[in-house]
Image (cartoon, coloured by chain):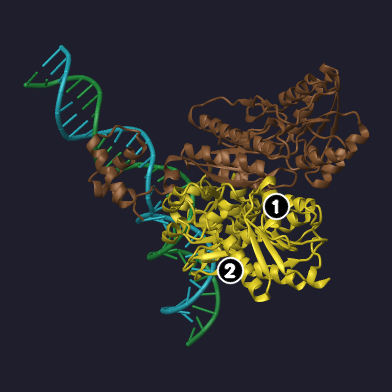
Chain colours: A brown, B yellow, C green, D cyan
Amino acid sequence: MTTIDDVAKAAGVSASTVSYVLSGKRTISAPTRARVERAIEKLGYRPHAGARALASARTAVIALMVPLRVGVNVPVIMQFVAGVVTRARDFEHDVLLLTQDDVSGLDRVTSGSMVDALVMMDIEADDPRVPLVAAAKQPTVLIGLPQDPEGLSCVDLDFEAAGRVAVRHLVGTGHTDLALIGSPPEVLRRHTSYAERLMRGLRDQAAGSGAAVTVEACDSTPSGAVQAVDTLLDTAPDTTGVIVHNEAALPHVLARLAERGRVPGTDVSVVAVCPTDVALAQRIPMTSIDLPAEDIGKVAVDMVMARLGGDQPSETRLLAPVLTERASSAPGPAAR
Amino acid sequence: MTTIDDVAKAAGVSASTVSYVLSGKRTISAPTRARVERAIEKLGYRPHAGARALASARTAVIALMVPLRVGVNVPVIMQFVAGVVTRARDFEHDVLLLTQDDVSGLDRVTSGSMVDALVMMDIEADDPRVPLVAAAKQPTVLIGLPQDPEGLSCVDLDFEAAGRVAVRHLVGTGHTDLALIGSPPEVLRRHTSYAERLMRGLRDQAAGSGAAVTVEACDSTPSGAVQAVDTLLDTAPDTTGVIVHNEAALPHVLARLAERGRVPGTDVSVVAVCPTDVALAQRIPMTSIDLPAEDIGKVAVDMVMARLGGDQPSETRLLAPVLTERASSAPGPAAR
DNA sequence: CTAGCGTGTTGAACCGCTTCGACAACTGCC
DNA sequence: GGCAGTTGTCGAAGCGGTTCAACACGCTAG
């Protein structure tokens, strides 16, 4: 292993000079810098991460806690992860992967000074991890919203606004009998906040627009989708505007609607809340409210880095929903 | 931050004693150990990871390089990841997440002593990363097989055997006109070895059994599946035995086969190569050769840990394929 | 001509832990 | 009773960086 002393010797300077060349924290004359850089290059020198962490109290690593549990949509998660990892690299940071079920991992990486900061996904309303990270010395950003985001940094799609936008779109195109086909029951049971926020927005706007809205939970399986659609059409047969917030079930929901004589884009208008690529991968291009998973991941890293740098206050950022109209929209009864 | 000295002071012993209590590398009397453990508990002491890494040359972290590129099936990847992470935790290790496109990450974590070992997924035949890890001081396990696995540790499903098993099953149930609906073209273009190994096994066994086998690449999209099925049925209309190795396309392949008058499980026999949960999530339970992704991940960690411990030689482990017959099998022409 | 200043570089003190060699206290044996 | 062997504990030397105070040097200003 080549050390900073080897480099210093090779360049004919002291170790501290090498360190300052690397960190840029002091001015170094051009010729000296050049000699040092050449030595680094020649020796293939890489600072020892542990030594650096010890001396500087910085690890250049952030922890990312991802859910590996049922009911969450894996490809979407990967988009978050991709966003976090690529943006972290922009800040010269690496990512340590923690899983949601390993709550002790939080304390481990936190108290053990393994990471500079934390990003946590899939926050529930009353999440047991929230008090833990609030007590940690490392800044944390939550993807999703806990019940009480006081003093915490959070980022997410503004699901409440998304609910309103969806309803406005459907009502505006002539629909008054609306329905949400949403997350699996276990997600709702956990009180994962995005599901509740979406419903709130939906109901608020529906009430304000004089529209009715039925809500169905939906398992992320083909049969779950079939069941949800069947129950919906039995309960509220007049439904013509459907909002689907369940990536995995989406194709089967569309298929079942068609089987039951409600062809999406013709007889019923369907708005999906999902990443754009998912919306485009359906049998017909879906009108959708984009869930910009990768962007949210990136923003999370931006926020956490900002707090690592200056002494930024914590903030909550809710990304404005964007609805794009595509082939699954159709005029409703009131417009015909 | 509480340090080992704080603990030592609180327990009335020296720092080295605390260290030995923690590591168990020397015998400590029961009363002393108890005092130390109580102090650790009371102070909530966690050793500083960086300091530990510096002094012991061990980080308790392994790097995992995952593909985030097109053409790979995301849920399956997550299963590998889950296997790796959970097994790593069994060995008291954490996982640093690297992405495939960041080749320089290899050198960074390796030369910077950020990790003790490496696990790399999705190895291509002539993978540029292989020489890099071969030169690294950290042991590495590859998930997948490079062209020349000399001196490297690898683990994977034995796809060649899987190909043979699939053909034997189909031929044994009366099919002689077989087809593979496989990976997307870009995967084949990369010469990802599993695709090629599967084909080799398929062709070998087909040749030996006097069966014909047509091969179709298949994009991981609905339309890709439709196209692959259509091309297949145009090229080889007599096909009655189909092997599908493409999780994402599988449902659409089945649907299209049915649309074209070849109902899986009745008119054609379909064998899927995929995780069991995917096989069971189709419209009919699929006869499948299990891709035990999570297990493979775990085995990879086991292997890498074994090499970290003793000076094990490198080895290649190919997991034997297991075919489970389910509803998508049907007797072929020769058996009717 | 010298005091004072800014610039570039250095030595040394940490950062918190592991581990080796030394040593004190006990044990059992001849 | 003395000696070799265990057992349990400790002190100190690193591990490889960062950073602070100090210093040497060449300038400018007075």
Can residue B262 be seen in the rendering of this structure?
A: yes
**Location of residue B178 (image quadrant):** bottom right
Q: Chain of mark 2?
A: B
Q: Which residue is labeled 1 in the image?
A: B230
Left or right, B160 with reference to A91: right
Left or right, B190 with reference to B180: left
Left or right, B65 with reference to A32: right
Task: Please give the label number shown on residue B317.
Answer: 2
Q: Chain of mark 1?
A: B
- Seen from the viewer's position, the closer of residues A207 and A109 is A207
- Seen from the viewer's position, the closer of residues A42 and A114 is A42
In the image, is residue A66 above or below residue C30? above
Q: CA distance from mark 2 to mark 1?
A: 37 Å
Q: Could you say where residue B23 lies in the image, as x and y percent from the top left?
A: 54, 59
- Seen from the viewer's position, the closer of residues C15 and A136 is A136
**Location of residue A287 (image quadrant):** top right
